Amino acid sequence: MAIALALVGFLLGSVLVPLQTRVEENQVGTARKALENIRDAMIGFAAVNGYLPCPDATSGGSSNDGIENFSGSFCTSINGAMVVGNVPWATLGVPETVDPWGNRYRYAVIENYARRSPLMFSLGTIVNGALRVCATTACATLVIPSTSDNAVAVILSHGKNGWGAINSLTNTANTAPTSADELENSDNDKDFVYRERTAAGTTAGEFDDVVIWLSRAVLMNRMVAAGKLP
């Protein structure tokens, strides 16, 4: 009987582990598709308005409501030349953006590309080093090496562990990440890490964030096509 039970347990384990892996891969794919749709909505927003939306603030009054936060011509929560917060889903006119693990998507944008009246957006608008997408937190290797085609916006999900994310039910921040690369994606500075997922305990450290960005070249091409730039 003991041998039979052990055999059943082994067989169940061999089935459940691949199933769990497939579920997680499907969730990652869902998050990535949602991020791509958000990026498309942001490009459409810029094509209509001439600038990218400001983030939705994560704390304080009128925060976590999906509406971009700005004062006059400027986004709030400015950190140097960039601003960061939640994706402003209501401003974009898309369904509430919550990742497959129940957390809000993070959004950072170069301030010049989201400023309005007077518009700072032009073919000459380049803010070198304002947002960097890196292979690791040390940022010795840039995923986007060209300063003329740097990321003007970064959108991400904090993945299955959700560390550092804003929980969509409580509108409060989850526990901070413990790995350096995940911490880089939640510390509200100009650097973000994009790399393959790795499990806790590996040499590279745990990393399950899903990260995409909007490049300057893509945005400029769409703005020219929409007649917003000469």
Image (cartoon, grey):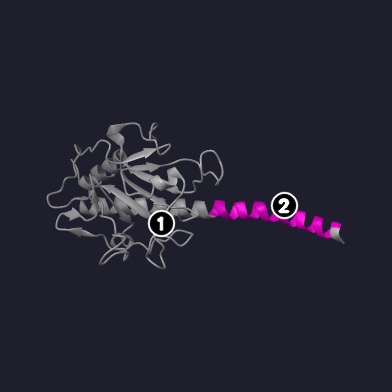
Disc 1 crowd rating (10 Å Cα; few below 14, some 14-19, many 20+) is many
Image coordinates of residue 68 in percent, x first then y, are 26, 60
**SS for callout 2:** helix
Q: Tell me, yes or no, whether the two marked residues, 2 and 1, touch with CB atoms within 8 Å.
A: no
Q: Is residue 190 visible?
A: yes
Quadrant containing the C terminus is top left
Disc 2 crowd rating (10 Å Cα; few below 14, some 14-19, many 20+) is few
The amino acid on which the numbered mark 1 sits, given as a three-letter code, is Ala
| Foreground residue among 5 and 143 | 5
Residue 9 image-quadrant placement: bottom right
Which residue is located at x 39 percent, y 60 percent?
A: 173
Which residue is located at x 19 percent, y 50 percent?
A: 115
Which labelled disc corresponds to residue 184? none
**Mark 2 vs mark 1: which is more N-terminal?**
2
Residue marked by disc 1: 165
| Foreground residue among 113 and 17 | 17
Magenta segment boundaries in residue numbering: 3-26
In the displayed structure image, the side of residue 9 where residue 53 appears, left or right: left
In the displayed structure image, the side of residue 142 where residue 80 appears, left or right: left
The amino acid on which the numbered mark 2 sits, given as a three-letter code, is Ser
Image coordinates of residue 200 in percent, x first then y, are 55, 47
From this view, report whether residue 202 is shown above or below residue 42.
above
Q: CA distance from mark 2 to mark 1?
A: 32 Å
Q: Find out whether residue 2 is within the magenta segment.
A: no
| Foreground residue among 178 and 216 | 178
| Foreground residue among 207 and 25 | 207
From this view, report whether residue 74 is shown above or below residue 142.
below
